[in-house]
Image (cartoon, rainbow, N blue to C red):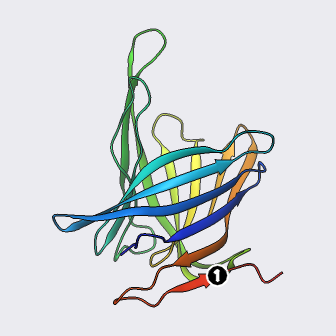
């Protein structure tokens, strides 16, 4: 389970740098809910900070984002264990009212594409789940995420109108607790 002080650092191919720090962990029934502070630094701009709730159980990980405007979002379910390669699930339901006042609703479907070894500036990570996400609103909207279940997101790749956007883990620090050794990963250069 996450611990207060856990920190993951990322670089995005757009030039942004992102730091995610766990600021609170609380039990909720059979789940643990971690509040994470995400700070995004874009070149030439002031840092932006938002809060994200991460829901963990013994066999699942989901992210809960704050909706914007008329938007309604269910948590985005990143993985279920023990999922097998080619297993899929409903990852998220989204609805909103468009500029003409019409309600728009769609779903995001997740599928385990492979279990892979992934290299990032923070190191080499074996046993990462490559989860492919697609939208029923626009099948070309895709996101690939490589997740190390005991760490978190190691890499993502999405398509923004034909331009690949890649996010990679550059470093991490996991706070030691009784159930897990603390450790850190940093680039070797």
Q: Can you tell which quarter of the image residue 122 is in?
A: bottom right
Left-right relation of 77 to 165? left
Q: Can you tell which quarter of the image residue 23 is in?
A: bottom left
Q: Residue furthest top?
A: 100
| Up/down of 180 relative to 55, above or below | below
Q: Could you classify mark 1 by the number of other residues whose Cα lies within 10 Å: few (under 14), some (14-19), or many (20 or more)?
A: some
134, 168: nearer the viewer: 168
Left-right relation of 55 to 146? left
Q: Which element type, helix, strand or loop, lies under badge 1?
A: strand
Q: What residue lies at 78% left-to-right and 84% top-to-bottom?
A: 188
Quadrant location of the N terminus in the rendered image: bottom left
> Is residue 154 visible to us here?
no
Residue 107 position, x and y percent, is 39, 41
Left-right relation of 22 to 11? left
Residue on which the image places disc 1: 185
Quadrant location of the C terminus in the rendered image: bottom right
Q: What residue lies at 43% left-to-right and 51% top-to-bottom?
A: 52
| Up/down of 124 relative to 72, above or below | below
Q: What residue lies at 73% left-to-right and 45% top-to-bottom?
A: 42
| Up/down of 60 relative to 77, above or below | below
Residue 183 position, x and y percent, is 55, 86
> Is residue 115 visible to us here?
yes
Q: What residue lies at 30% left-to-right and 73% top-to-bottom?
A: 59
Residue 25 position, x and y percent, is 33, 65
């Amino acid at each position: 389970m996450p611990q207060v002080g856990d920190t993951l650092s990322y670089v995005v191919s757009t030039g942004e740098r992102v730091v995610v720090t766990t600021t609170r962990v609380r039990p909720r029934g059979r789940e643990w809910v971690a509040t994470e502070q995400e700070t995004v630094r874009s070149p030439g701009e002031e840092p932006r900070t938002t809060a994200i709730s991460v829901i963990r159980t013994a066999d699942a990980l989901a992210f809960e984002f704050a909706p914007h405007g008329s938007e309604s979002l269910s948590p985005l379910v990143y993985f279920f264990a023990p999922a097998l390669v080619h297993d899929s699930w409903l990852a998220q339901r989204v609805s909103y009212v468009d500029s003409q006042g019409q309600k728009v609703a769609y779903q995001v479907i997740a599928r385990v594409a492979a279990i892979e070894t992934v290299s990032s500036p923070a190191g080499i990570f074996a046993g990462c789940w490559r989860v492919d996400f697609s939208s029923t609103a626009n099948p070309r909207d895709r996101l690939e995420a490589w997740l190390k279940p005991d760490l978190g997101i190691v890499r993502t790749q999405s398509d923004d109108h034909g331009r690949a956007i890649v996010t990679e883990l550059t470093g991490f620090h996991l706070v030691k607790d009784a159930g897990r050794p603390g450790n850190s990963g940093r680039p070797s250069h």
